[in-house]
């Protein structure tokens, strides 16, 4: 089962190294990781998606909570939350086939952000499954480059 | 000056710990970091935004290139690229003021993804400056929670 762990951490050098070493030490591979700013410039939010043994993960979360620069840890499993991932994808698009791709982009509420003679660059955000469905549909055209932010999540309803 | 470094890495435990230790060892604070999947499931793309001394950064990039699990490193400085960041933001929104916030969301081409009696959750993506302009405009309403993926980037035009 995949877990989305969200941690508020002090924005200072070494915190990320410390945390990623904690996960690696337990043999966890990180599916995705996003570290970005929050409303407070001194604090960053780290969202980690990992898959692995529940009990071992519970221990990692306990260890995380003990790290001084970690202010708060949440595991979204079993909670009601909104998750989003963002992707930039460069698709092979000779002029004759551009229309087909643009149709898919519109259906998925994406945006074309760059056009060249032979390629389109598209921005698309949404839950993981939506991104994966789009990737599967454009794969036959040829994917030139693809870049994803990894997931971020916030719990629904008042805190 | 801020640098956006993009690295293709093998998707295996320990790579992230290795790389973040490299940056921390040189005293670099990471502004944002996004690690997500690519078109190849064995490979992840890591996008790091760092600010610091150019020469020291050049050395870090050289060291990065020597790491076996690192397949490719690009520094986007001085290149033509598209960058995107995604944010989920929960804003204080009593029913009487909801309309004002929704107006801003529409202007910024964002999406309302959750509504409760007293709050709105909004998804917004774009370049860093757009996100920051939106945050500044909704701050007076009261920001309850905010989560950003950190930036990802792809070079414009054919590879």
Image (cartoon, coloured by chain):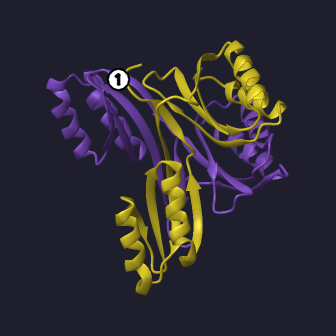
Chain colours: A yellow, B purple
Q: Choose top left, top right, bottom left or bottom right for residue A57.
A: top right
Depth check: give the residue in front, A134 or B153.
A134
Depth check: give the residue in front, A94 or B120.
B120
Count all numbered tags in the image, as a single digit: 1
Q: Chain of mark 1?
A: B
| Residue B64 % position (x, y) | 77, 47
SS assignment at label 1: strand
A25 sits left or right of A8 in the view: right
| Residue receiving disc 1 | B143
Q: Quadrant of the C terminus of chain A?
A: top left
B120 sits left or right of B8 in the view: left
Q: Choose top left, top right, bottom left or bottom right for residue B99.
A: top left
Instruction: State whether residue B58 appears in this view.
Output: yes
Q: Residue at x 79, y 47 (%)?
A: B12
Q: Residue at x 19, y 30 (%)?
A: B98
Q: Residue at x 44, y 58 (%)?
A: A123
B68 sits left or right of B101 in the view: right
């Amino acid at each position: 089962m995949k877990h989305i762990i969200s941690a508020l951490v002090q924005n200072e050098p070494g915190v990320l190294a410390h945390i990623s070493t904690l996960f690696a030490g337990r043999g966890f591979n990180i599916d995705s990781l996003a570290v970005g700013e929050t409303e407070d410039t001194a604090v960053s939010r780290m969202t980690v998606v990992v898959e692995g043994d529940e009990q071992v993960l519970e221990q990692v979360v306990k260890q995380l909570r003990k790290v001084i620069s970690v202010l708060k840890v949440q595991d979204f499993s079993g909670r009601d939350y909104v998750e989003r991932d963002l992707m930039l994808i460069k698709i092979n698009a000779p002029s004759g086939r551009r229309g087909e791709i643009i149709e898919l982009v519109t259906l998925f509420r994406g945006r074309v952000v760059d056009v060249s003679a032979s390629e389109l660059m598209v921005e698309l955000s949404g839950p993981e499954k939506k991104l994966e469905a789009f990737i599967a549909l454009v794969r036959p055209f040829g994917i030139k480059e693809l870049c994803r932010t990894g997931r971020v999540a916030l719990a629904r309803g008042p805190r």
